[in-house]
Amino acid sequence: MSDKILEIKHLKKYFALKNRLVVKAVDDVSLELNRGETLGLVGESGSGKSTIAYVLVGMYEATEGEILYKGGDLAKAGLYRTLKQKGEIQIVFQDPGSSLNPKRTIRKSLMVPLQVHDRGLSKPQMDARVEELLEAVGLPVEFADKYPRAMGGGERQLISVARALATHPSLVILDEPTSALDVSIQAKVISKLVTLQKELMLSYLFITHDLSLMRNVADRVAILYLGRLCEQAPTADFFEKPLHPYTRMLLSSIPVATSEEEELKPAKIISTGEIPSPVNVPPGCAFHQRCKDMLPVCSAERPVMREVSPGHQVCCHLYNAN
Ligand code: SF4
């Protein structure tokens, strides 16, 4: 039996602007996620990583492609998913300050998904479930009657996690869940997410711009550039043998903690040129204007994704030429 929980095939999400301009925010992305796995989806601002998240949770309709989840195609369902499908795929946003209603107590915020997805619950059963959710994320049950403003950033983010868990999800999309937090608080939230994943057999799509964070958190890593996937690989393989010139550039500038990691790190690569506008993605390889290894074919022909070793895929003419 397949262990895949999610299969994204050739996903596209385009936005039409005035003057017939089109932003190709996500352009032919294929990804898989296994049950109980964390896939780190890494990219700079404007790479399309959050757009993929919003399509997956049904906030945006896909322009093209398939999103296969438990035997159904969520892309076909568009914004009209079943309640069960909505409950099973949840998202935790970057900023807990703006994703929690400041006028609601934590109890009321946590009751909202229960009122929609667990309609048969009585008031005492809902109160019990709220306490259970707070305990699951390691917060005292007394927090139920607090307002978000009376809590720290890490505590508010744990409330967002509790709210996501309220509907018994299988897949949780973590959209930069710790980037708005202090480093010491980040570690606490990440540790709780890892524990919850094991306890509840959750699958995580962990979206981040912080590649170094993925070294210890992700089972596999995928890199996005201007709406296109460059490379994906199991985490150890990814950090030991990065292949795509853009991946190597990103890795050359991240901080490392040990001498072994320093040894594996590519020599510093200074980026040439600016990231092009997503409205005007260059022809051929989207990275060719910044790539030091560019071949003549790169400005004319878009490379295709190719598997170079088990589970390690790269989209670059350097590897297509072999
Ligand atoms: Fe560089 Fe060409 Fe590979 Fe693009 S396809 S990353 S331009 S070598």
Image: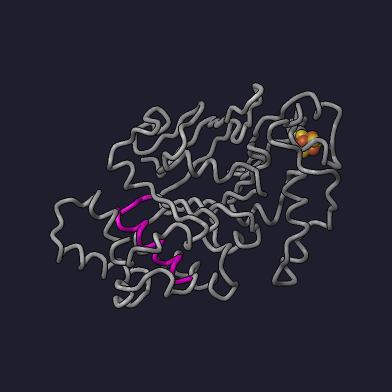
Location of the C terminus by quadrant is: top right
Looking at the image, which residue is at 61% across and 35% down?
25
Q: Position of residue 31 (x, y in %)?
A: 53, 39
Colouring scheme, one of rainbow, by chain, secondary structure, one colour: one colour
Q: Position of residue 311 (x, y in %)?
A: 58, 44
Eyeballing the image, is 144 above or below 179? below
Looking at the image, which residue is at 30% across and 73% down?
145
Residue 132 visible in image: yes
Image quarter for residue 255? bottom right
Image quarter for residue 46? top right
Image quarter for residue 19? top right
Is 237 part of what is drawn in magenta?
no
Count of labels shown?
0
Is 160 part of what is drawn in magenta?
yes
Q: Position of residue 30 (x, y in %)?
A: 55, 35
Location of the N terminus by quadrant is: top left
Compared across the picture, whether 15 is left or right of 58 comes to right
Residue 197 visible in image: no
Q: Position of residue 163 (x, y in %)?
A: 35, 59
Looking at the image, which residue is at 85% across and 32% down?
295
Q: Which contiguous range is marked in magenta?
A: 154-170
Q: Residue furthest front?
A: 103
Compared across the picture, whether 169 is left or right of 96 comes to left
Q: Main secondary structure of the magenta part?
A: helix
Compared across the picture, whether 206 is left or right of 249 comes to left
Quadrant of picture, ligand 1: top right
Eyeballing the image, is 10 above or below 57? above
Q: Nearer the viewer, residue 209 or 170?
A: 209
Q: Nearer the viewer, residue 224 or 3?
A: 224
Looking at the image, which residue is at 78% across and 51% down?
249
